[in-house]
Image: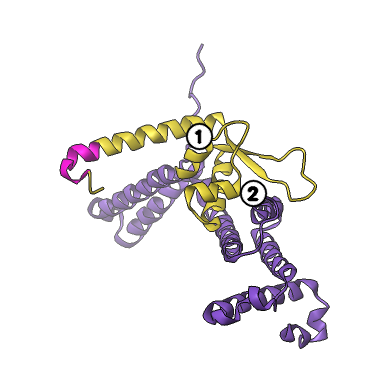
Amino acid sequence: MLLLTTVPSALAADALWLRFLLTLVFLLAKLLARVRPHRRLNQTHRFPRQAARLAISSLTDLAALLAGGRRQALREEWHAHLAGESGHDPITWREVRQALGFIAAALQFRLADAADLAWRPADAVLGSRILSNLFVGGPVIVVLFAIVHHDGRFGLVTDIQDAGELGAFLYGVIRAGRWWRAVKPPEPKARRAKE
Amino acid sequence: MDVLDVITSSPADNPPWGLRLCEVTGYGTGTIYPALDRLLKAGWITDQWEDPPPEDRPRRRFYEMTSTGREQYAAGLRARRSRRAAWRQFAPGAGGAV
């Protein structure tokens, strides 16, 4: 609590900062109580039970904030989790670990979101036949032009395998990518309608 | 699969929620909630909030399997059994150790 009184007034005005600081103080106090058992918090009552609940609640709110706006429902779900089966379970180290687990879960949500975002262009290529063909055929055509430019048409006879290998590799990348991402491009349209 | 095992084996009138899943599977919150999020995204499970909401505590979020989830879960179980059978044939002496 001494630390709280020394907090600058600018920070004290911000409720989120204050709650976050309270959480840190609570965790530190719990840690000290573990290191020095004769000064256990439960015995000395230096840290009120309500403050402990507020600290854990702040940690959970921070986790919900980290999880993003699309997952606001998690805040209530996690608070219900901490309340336990009875709905009014006391705060123990188990709850602290669970609250820290919420932070880890929130970070994983964010990482998964970032990975989904990063995969989006690749999924667009894998899911479209035109883009997939461009991905394979484009570099092959560029290589063929380069061969003709440097070695003339005779170069096509001697170096055609380079373009073939590149095409096979890129085709393999597309097939592997579709398998990995479970993406299936639309079936090609029939060239001639049934009469 | 552990999470799905619990959700599938739970009775319809007492569906599992986050805390119960953690207790039964033995996994922490940092493992269970991302797994639930992935299963929800895949459409294998669906969620339902406690209704009516209790006055003295926050609402709980219950999870249950969808028909797609049941099919995929059954397919996963079959694949797991066949893998285990293949492994026993491949290494009959190591079955007990594994």
Q: Which mark is residue A85?
A: 2
Q: Is residue A64 visible?
A: yes
Q: Is residue A187 visible?
A: no
Give the residue type that dot 1 points to: Ser
Residue at the location (72% across, 85% down)? Answer: A3
Is residue A49 toward the left or the right of residue A144 in the image?
A: right
Q: Position of residue A61 (x, y in %)?
A: 70, 62
Of the 4 image quadrants, the one containing the N terminus of chain A is bottom right
Q: Can marks 1 and 2 be said to lie on one chain? A: no
The stretch in magenta equals B86-95
Q: Is residue A135 above or below residue B63?
A: below
Q: Which residue is mark 1?
A: B9
Q: Position of residue B30 (x, y in %)?
A: 54, 58
Residue at the location (48% across, 29% down)? Answer: B71
Is residue A120 toward the left or the right of residue B54 in the image?
A: left
Give the chain ID for the yellow colour. B
Q: Position of residue B11 (x, y in %)?
A: 57, 32
Magenta stretch prevailing secondary structure: helix
Q: Residues within 10 Å of mark 1 (few under 14, many from 20)?
A: few
The reply to whether the magenta stretch includes residue B5 is no
Q: Element type at marker 1?
A: helix
Pointers 1 and 2 in contact (CB under 8 A)?
Answer: no
Give the chain ID for the purple colour. A
Subunit ID for the residue under disc 2: A
Give the residue type that dot 2 points to: Glu
In which quarter of the view is residue A179 placed?
top left
Q: Element type at marker 2?
A: loop
Q: Position of residue A168 (x, y in %)?
A: 32, 47
Q: Residues within 10 Å of mark 2 (few under 14, many from 20)?
A: few
